Each structure stands twice: as structure tokens, then as C-alpha cells.
Image (cartoon, rainbow, N blue to C red):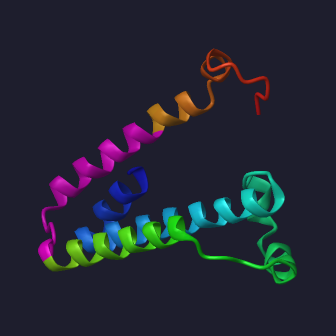
């Protein structure tokens, strides 16, 4: 959501914003799914820094496509086609785009405090506080 708001405030296009943000999220989710299935641990920030090594290691594994992946990719495709067909206009008002950018920035600040809160992680009963 936050990435979509930032992209939308820059481009003013619903489609560009939706396409870029959902493509990144879908790609990250699929990479995380495969990593959990194959290695039994989720993607961490360090994994993003080692993307070249990960691409070399990917050749050692057999990748599969099941119904979950098909549903995710179909949802991504249908959503992008829908936005492309029915939300073609662009927002040209700089004032409105700046307001959207400020909302995105405020959400980013709010979520960054929530995401980094040890009390929230402790309240859900996890021992692994990153």
C-alpha cells in the first residue's frame, strides 16, 4: 500500500502504481514461498543482498507450480487487466498528488514504529525478536 501510494504520487497513474507495487509484492511472496518450501526458512534482508548467489543456487533445486501459485499469478494478472481497462485516467493535480505522498509518508512512519516494536512481537508470544 505504501509503495503504491509513493509510486502513484510520482506517476499519477493508477495502472503504473498498481502494476509496479503488485509485481514487486508478488515476486517477493513467490520467492519467500519457494525459499520456505525448499530450505525451511523465510527470506531475510540479508538474502536480498545475496541475490547473485541465490540465483546460482537456484539451479540446484527443482521448482514446481501448484494451485496456490497459479491462483496468485491469476489474481495478479486479472487485477492488472482490470486496473488497465477501467482506471485509465491520470491524476494531474500536483496538490492532490502531494497530499497522497504525505499520506504515504505518514503511513510509512506509523508502520515503521509498529514493525520495530519489541512489545508487539513479545505480545504475540514469539521468542525470536529480530
Give the residue at x 65% y 66%: 31
From this viewpoint, is residue 53 visible? yes
Camera-side residue of 24 and 76:
76
Give the residue at x 86% y 77%: 57
Look at the picture and state if 116 lies above or below 41.
Answer: above
Camera-side residue of 27 and 94:
27
From the image, give the main secondary structure of the stretch colored magenta. helix
Give the residue at x 62% y 20%: 124
Left or right side of 105 for 12: left
Quarter of the image with the C terminus in it: top right
x, y percent for residue 55: 79, 79
Residue 65 location, quadrant: bottom right
From this viewpoint, is residue 89 visible? no
Residue 89 location, quadrant: bottom left
x, y percent for residue 1: 38, 51
Camera-side residue of 44 and 105:
44
Look at the picture and state if 129 lies above or below 31.
Answer: above
Magenta stretch: give its range: 86-108
Give the residue at x 31% y 51%: 101
* 106 in magenta: yes
Identity of the residue furthest to the front in this view: 67
Amino acid at each position: 500500500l505504501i509503495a503504491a501510494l509513493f509510486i502513484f504520487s510520482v506517476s499519477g497513474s493508477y495502472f503504473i502504481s498498481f502494476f509496479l507495487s503488485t509485481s514487486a509484492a508478488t515476486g517477493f511472496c513467490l520467492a519467500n514461498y519457494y525459499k520456505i518450501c525448499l530450505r525451511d526458512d523465510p527470506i531475510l534482508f540479508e538474502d536480498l543482498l545475496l541475490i547473485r548467489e541465490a540465483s546460482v543456487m537456484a539451479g540446484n533445486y527443482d521448482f514446481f507450480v501448484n494451485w496456490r501459485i497459479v491462483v496468485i499469478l491469476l489474481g495478479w494478472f486479472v487485477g492488472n487487466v482490470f486496473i488497465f481497462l477501467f482506471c485509465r485516467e491520470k491524476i494531474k493535480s500536483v496538490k492532490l498528488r502531494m497530499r497522497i505522498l504525505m499520506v504515504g509518508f505518514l503511513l510509512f512512519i506509523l508502520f515503521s514504529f509498529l514493525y520495530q516494536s519489541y512489545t508487539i512481537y513479545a505480545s504475540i508470544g514469539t521468542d525470536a525478536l529480530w
